[in-house]
Amino acid sequence: RAKQEGKNQYRFFDTSLSTNTEEAMELAGQLRRALEKDEFFIHYQPQIEARTGKLTGLEALIRWQHPVRGLVPPGTFIPIAEETGLIVPIGEKVLHLVCAQSKIWQRAGLPPVRIAVNLSARQFAQKNFAARLGEILEEHEMEPRYIELEITENMAMKDDMQPVLQQLRDQGFTLSIDDFGTQYSSLNYLKKLPVQKIKIDRSFVTGISRDRKDEAIIAAMLHIADRLNLTVIAEGVETQEQLDFLKDNNCHSIQGYIFYKPQPAEEIEDLLKE
Ligand code: C2E
Ligand code: MG
Ligand code: MG
Ligand code: MG
């Protein structure tokens, strides 16, 4: 359609799709079909221990192979899925795919690796969410200790969500706070939340060796996390300077293109064999 509108028309498909445009409505309808036709799959991005270079975990990142548009990035369709509520079945699909893959690796005798899954606010706010997650894992005979749940600050800091977090923690899941520092970072909540990990957002990491303020904030985050016994992982690490700074400040794990991009399960399998 963009072509028909003339050469000088910008096409904002991948960047600023607003959920009430005609195109968003079209995608919303196609998301439903995508679920039925199994057009979603998972890329896994390795997380590496800074000190040793060892694999410490994987993050599951959803991908949509659209029959016409090709690969549609999550930044484009997750907001639409949230708006329409389709994020709930899509999120469950992700969990099923991750559990199934993990069991394949386990049965092949590969060393167990914890896989982090992103949760959306809408999923998290469902009634009986913790019980529902438990059921899905049971279906796959999957142990919760191999699954990490990534939530965001805004999700974690709602008072009525505290019992849900505690329940998930009691069930054996690892909990982490994604995109840490970009939303409401209340130190008071950090004290109370039953989470084990925080993920420093890429927006801070990109400031390393360019912006003293970003460096100061990262150093402070690492210091507080250490004192609170939280594990820290830095996201979006691309350069040697960033890696060196994070290592010097005792950041535990690194996730970023400097080591690995998100990749299909088959490629991860080779890594697990090493
Ligand atoms: P996120 O959870 O913060 O995931 C990290 C994003 O940073 C991923 O983008 C990853 O590919 C990208 N990334 C990792 N290392 C680097 C790096 O060194 N440089 C750069 N430039 N980028 C890096 P992706 O896969 O496009 O996902 C974007 C967001 O979509 C995720 O951010 C997450 O919020 C959301 N998302 C992805 N999968 C799911 C899912 O299954 N469910 C939900 N609810 N959200 C998801
Ligand atoms: Mg994440
Ligand atoms: Mg993040
Ligand atoms: Mg995120």
Image (cartoon, rainbow, N blue to C red):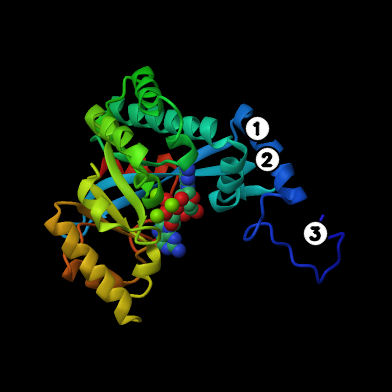
Q: Is mark 3 on a helix, strand or loop?
A: loop
Badge nearest the viewer, 3 or 1: 1
Q: Which of 230 and 128 is in front in this view?
A: 128
Q: Position of residue 60 (x, y in %)?
A: 41, 43
The residue that mark 3 highlights is 2
Q: Where is residue 63 in the image (x, y as percent from the top left)?
A: 53, 44
Whether the residues at callouts 2 and 1 have beta carbons within 8 Å, the answer is: yes
Where on the picture, by quarter, is residue 260?
bottom left
Amino acid type of disc 1?
Arg
Q: Where is residue 107 in the image (x, y as percent from the top left)?
A: 30, 24
Q: Which residue corresponds to the image point at 30% horizontal and 33% vertical from the top-left?
A: 163
Which image quadrant: the N terminus?
Answer: bottom right
- Looking at the picture, does residue 104 appear above or below residue 76? above
Q: Residues within 10 Å of mark 3 (few under 14, many from 20)?
A: few
Which image quadrant: the C terminus?
Answer: top left
The residue that mark 2 highlights is 28
Q: Which mark is residue 55?
A: none
Q: Which of 103 and 25 is in front in this view?
A: 25
Q: Residues within 10 Å of mark 2 (few under 14, many from 20)?
A: many
Viewer can see residue 241: no
On the rendering, which quadrant does ligand 3 occupy? bottom left
